[in-house]
Image: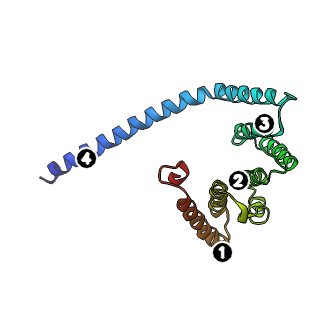
């Protein structure tokens, strides 16, 4: 009698495993197709980069137009090539200094801190966020970007460090900056949902 009661459970378990395995196989097949297309993704990225770089050759660009092209180029390099992203960020910052545009300089410093944190350069990220950004003059959007960079830094550092005291402090700060982001954004904002 007990065997008859276990048969439906065993059948459900086997169907569940089969279903999960079939789903996994479909996911792996889709992943294989995407990997096979990786060269075309890289070529598309390089074409976008080349197009932006050709636009930068135009000597008639204003400093602000050139700055905005560098900003676009930085976004292309951000998750693609760290060294080039850092180089473009340096050119952006030099232009913002040349224009004397404090708001753009702050944007550049926040992006630099985020890039440092993302690449595991935690000392540099923390130094930039804590010592090189005047948080008293941030616009609302810059506050959101600054809080997001701080949250990213503390989240990544929390996973990285084995020092329990630093880990605990980063955990507290990660939560604090997340709460600040939530206060400044609406529920339909992608950063709110992140």
Q: Earlier in the sequence, mark 1 or mark 4?
A: 4
Image coordinates of residue 113 in percent, x first then y, are 74, 55
Callout 4: SS: helix
Numbered badge on residue 65:
3
Q: Is residue 29 left or right of residue 95?
A: left
Callout 2: SS: helix
Q: Is residue 156 left or right of residue 94?
A: left
Query: Is residue 185 placed above or below 49 in the rendered structure?
Result: below
Instruction: Identify which residue, 31 or 79, lies in the foreground.
Output: 79
**Which of the two marks, 4 or 2, is nearer to us in this view?**
2
Q: Earlier in the sequence, mark 3 or mark 2?
A: 3
Q: Earlier in the sequence, mark 4 or mark 2?
A: 4
Instruction: Identify which residue, 122 or 188, lies in the foreground.
Output: 188
The furthest residue to the left? 1
Instruction: Identify which residue, 5 or 80, lies in the foreground.
Output: 80
Numbered badge on residue 114:
2
> Mark 1 — residue?
165
> Mark 4 — residue?
10
Image coordinates of residue 141 in percent, x first then y, are 64, 54
**Which of the two marks, 3 or 2, is nearer to us in this view?**
3
**Which of the two marks, 4 or 3, is nearer to us in this view?**
3
């Amino acid at each position: 009698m007990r065997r008859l009661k276990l048969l439906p459970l065993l059948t459900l378990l086997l169907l569940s495993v089969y279903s999960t395995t079939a789903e996994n196989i479909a996911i792996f097949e889709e992943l294989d197709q995407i990997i096979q297309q990786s060269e075309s993704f890289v070529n598309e990225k390089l074409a976008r980069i080349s197009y932006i770089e050709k636009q930068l050759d135009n000597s008639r660009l204003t400093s602000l137009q050139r700055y905005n092209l560098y900003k676009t180029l930085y976004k292309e390099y951000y998750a693609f090539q760290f060294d080039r992203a850092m180089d473009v960020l340096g050119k952006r910052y030099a232009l913002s200094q040349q224009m004397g545009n404090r708001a753009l300089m702050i944007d550049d410093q926040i992006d630099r801190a985020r890039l440092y944190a993302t690449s595991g350069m935690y000392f540099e990220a923390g130094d930039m966020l804590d010592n090189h950004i005047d948080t008293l003059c941030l616009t609302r959007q810059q506050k959101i970007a600054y809080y997001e960079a701080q949250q990213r830094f503390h989240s990544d550092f929390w996973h990285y460090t084995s020092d329990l005291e630093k880990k605990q402090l980063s955990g507290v700060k990660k939560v604090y900056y997340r709460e600040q982001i939530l206060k400044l954004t609406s529920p339909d904002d992608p950063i709110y949902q992140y």
